[in-house]
Amino acid sequence: MTSVPTILVSGPLGSGKTSLLRHLIGDNAGLRFAAIVNDFGEVGIDGDLLRASASRVVEVANGCICCATQSELPFSVRMILGQYDPDYIVIEMSGEGDPTPVVRALKRLAPLIVLTRHVAVLDLTLAPDTLIGDHVTRNAILGADLLVLNKTDLASAATQRLWRRLVSRMNAAAETLEARHGVIESSILLRGVAPRERLPGAERPTHEHRHRALESYCFRGDQEIERARLARLMGQHGRNFIRAKGFVRIEGRMHEFQAVRGGWSLTPFEGALSDGGTRIVFLSRSLAKETMRSLCEAALSPSGQSAG
């Protein structure tokens, strides 16, 4: 039996994990990729972003894949292997997910699969001290064999130096690459390097799993959204959304919407969607779900009504 090589991608919310996988899959059209995607929210968005290029996408939504390692994750892997013949399996974790139990669960699935890469994607625009106390990000850094320092085009030189020193101290044995928009040489991901065994006495990742207070709300609508209304919502309240993403119909065309801690963007989207309407998932630590609902309905729904 030939083990199917499997790549695990972890990292904090908005760091660029989906962008990295979209580039990997799109740059290797001759290979069959199956993707398992975990979104922290009631509606999956990343699955649609990868579906255009991956042979098969399985979504684990409304939760955290590290809490599903005893059931959903092994089931999803076995289902993919039973129904498809992928060259690679790629697994994208939610930014809220601790990779430690996931790595253990994947190793237990040998010889069906072999974990060849654990990639941690980090957002260089954030000050390192805002994340170093976060056990999820810490475990991603400690457990990865490849660290991708993303958004070098947006981070100051001083912040980049701090990040480099930090990851070098925490995980000197990992390969470290810098990237813009999650783009790295895909052969590095596919070269089949198995995650290393840790040296005796090295700091090990721990699974102190406790979900921090995080509220999720999905705005849905069949109507078009006025760009000015969306801009006003993000201008007034964007800083309260640590992450937002989805699909928005503006001026007769579907757009991909991405927002991280106040910054946001709209990009025309040409792929097929599982749901043709507007749907945006908002995540916040400072706003309750009902507050997000009220803000979004007031800002985005002309009639003040929404199915979200």
Image (cartoon, rainbow, N blue to C red):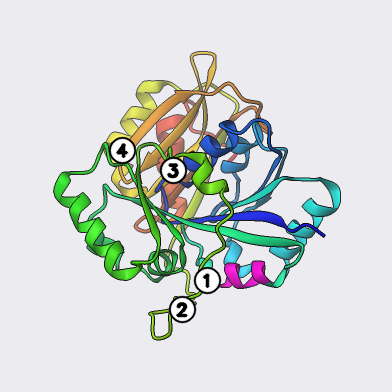
Q: Position of residue 137 (x, y in %)?
A: 39, 64
In whole angstroms, how far apart are the C-alphas of marks 1 and 2? 7 Å
Q: Nearer the viewer, mark 1 or mark 4?
A: 1
The numbered dot on residue 100 is 1
Is 22 situated above or below 166?
A: above
Residue that extends furthest to the right in the rendered view of this protein: 82
Please tell me which of labels 3 and 4 falls first in the chain. Answer: 3
Magenta part of the chain: 100-107
Question: Is 119 positioned to the left or the right of 128 in the image?
Answer: right
Which of the pair 39/213 is nearer the observer? 39
Q: Indicate the amino acid at tag 1.
A: Thr
Q: Which residue is mark 3?
A: 244
Q: Amino acid at mark 2?
A: Thr
* Relative horizontal placement of residue 112, taking residue 103 as reference (left or right): right
Disc 4 designates what residue? 263
The answer to whether the residue labelled 1 contacts the one labelled 2, judged by CB atoms less than 8 Å apart, is yes
Residue 134 lies, with reference to residue 152, above or below; the image says below
Asked whether 131 or 262 is in front, the reply is: 131
Q: Main secondary structure of the magenta part?
A: helix
Marks 1 and 4 sit apart, C-alpha to C-alpha, by 30 Å
Residue 196 point in image, percent of width and height: 50, 69
State the residue in front, 181 or 243. 181
Using the numbered discs, state the Cα–Cα distance from disc 4 to disc 2 in whole angstroms. Answer: 32 Å
Q: Mark 3 belongs to which amino acid?
A: Ala
